[in-house]
Every structure is written in C-alpha cells, then in structure tokens.
Amino acid sequence: IVLETLTEEELVKGNSILSEISLAGNIAGSILASVFPNSLMVTGMFLLSLISNLTFVPKYEGKTNANRKEMFNDIKNLYYPVISYFAFNLSAELFFTVYVPLNYSMGNPEYVVFLSYTILYIVDEFMYSKVVNFVKGKEVRYIYFSIFGRAIISLSLALLVETQLKIGLGIVGFFMAYGPIFPLYSTAFFSIVVKGLKRNRATILGLLNAAEDVASIIGGLVLGLAETLSGAYMMSFYALAVAMFSFSAYLSSKGLQSKPASPQKKKEYTQASS
C-alpha cells in the first residue's frame, strides 16, 4: 500500500527504509529474546502489531499505481530476475544456517554466534542508510560484484572446511564480509528491476520478497541433502552461479548489455559483464 504510491526513484529509497525498520525490529527482537526469553513477549508483540495496523493503516490515503492487466505481463517478463533473486537468497539461507555448526566446529563459544548477528544487523542498518545514493548509476556493476563476492566467500569456506584448518574467531571475518553485501545487492537489484515499469512496481517488489521467503524455506529443507559443512557451502556457491547466469540472461533479454541507452551506459554494462 505504501510503496505503490511512490515514484520510481522514491520506491527504491522507500523499500530501503522499510528494510531498515525491519532490521531494527530484528535487533530489538534479538536483545529482548536474550533478556526476556518468554512466549508472552512474542504474544505481546503480535498484539501490539495488530493494534498498530488497525489504528494506522485505515487512515492511510493515497492512490495506488497498479494495473491488473499490465501486472500479469510484467510478471511474465520477470521470471529471470525472480530466479536470480531466489537463487541468491537460497545461497544466503544455506550460508547463515551452517554458520552455527561451523562456529562450534572451530571451537568458538556459543556467544560468538549471537554477537556476530548483532554486529551484522547494526552494519546492515548503516548500509541501508547509505546505499541508495552509493549504487545510483552503477547498479549492474554492484549486482555482479555482490554475487561474485559471496561466491568467493562460500567457495573459500568450503575449502577451509575440507582442509580441516581451525581458524577460531577468524570465521567471523568471513561472516562479516558475506552479510553486509545484501543491502548493496538488494538496493541495486530492485533499482534495475523497477526501471521501465510504468505501474505495478510495488507488486513486483512483493513478488521478489515472496521469492526470498520461499528461498528461506527451501534452503532449510535442502540443507539436509548436504552431508557435510563443505557440501553445504558448495551448494551455496552453485546457487550463486545460478543467480549470476539468470541475471545476465535478464540483462540480455532486455537489451541492457547489447543495446545500452548511452555511451556511458555502454561502458558501464561492458565493464560489469566482463
């Protein structure tokens, strides 16, 4: 409801702000869960959310920019981005899930996991506040950088596990290099996908967010197929390969690689594709 009323440029920033708010909730939730591990706290939060929605949402005014007929056509033309975004988040789910057993296998204390996620949330919060202007005009380059960077990290950890090298707290460095890439990737990715869409931009963002949720569910299920930690990281690596090739196919299908809008765009897309 909120995003559908925004312009193309405002939409990306608005989605980033909502992500910041979501992260703030994650941080607060992590702290509350450690201080007050009580199911009544969860129930209370749901009730607070329900009351807030009933109070504020009906008061929201604005005209949505949606068109049902165009929506189905837009969705049909965006299966490559959906596959790419799904694969990227599937890889992330695999990575973050096996971080816990990896931490223990390195002999680190339990609090390291909690501390790692707390720091990650704070860094992500900072990233979202800066990333919109940072990626502007260089979205494709940063999308490729994000996928490639995470692929290198996943592959490195797979090799690390295979060599049985114990680096202790050193794995936190891999974790912190991997995690904050998402704000950079998601903002650049959404910017590319919504370009050229006259309507239904928020609907498309909703579709991509749904793909992220499905990836989280499937990631937990397919993790059982990986018999070892190194196998899980290799699955994460291959998922990123799918994400990269799918995104490249999308650019080709839209003519963003072969028919850029200007010499400057041509140089940018050529460098990013290389």
Image (tube, rainbow, N blue to C red):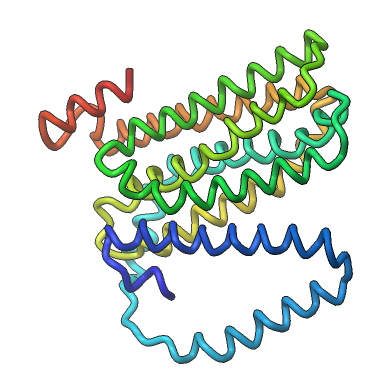
Q: At 35% from the left edge and 57% from the top edge, which residue is drawn?
A: 73
Q: Is residue 162 left or right of residue 257?
A: right
Closer to the camera, 267 or 135?
A: 135
Closer to the camera, 167 or 143?
A: 167
Q: Is residue 84 above or below residue 132?
A: above
Residue 239 in the image: x percent, y percent?
A: 60, 30
Location of residue 90 by image quarter: top right
Closer to the camera, 188 or 75?
A: 188
Location of residue 233 by image quarter: top right
- Name, please, the residue furthest toward the top: 163
Q: At 74% from the left edge and 44% from the top edge, which residue is drawn?
A: 115
Please tell me how many numbered marks the rendered image carries.
0
Residue 9 in the image: x percent, y percent?
A: 27, 58
Q: Is residue 77 above or below residue 163?
A: below
Q: Image quadrant for the N terminus?
A: bottom left
Q: Is residue 26 left or right of residue 257?
A: right
Residue 61 in the image: x percent, y percent?
A: 37, 87
Location of residue 72 by image quarter: bottom left
Q: Is residue 165 above or below residue 247?
A: above
Q: At 46% from the left edge and 46% from the top edge, which residue is drawn?
A: 186
Q: Image quadrant for the C terminus?
A: top left
Q: Is residue 181 left or right of residue 94?
A: left
Residue 211 in the image: x percent, y percent?
A: 56, 51
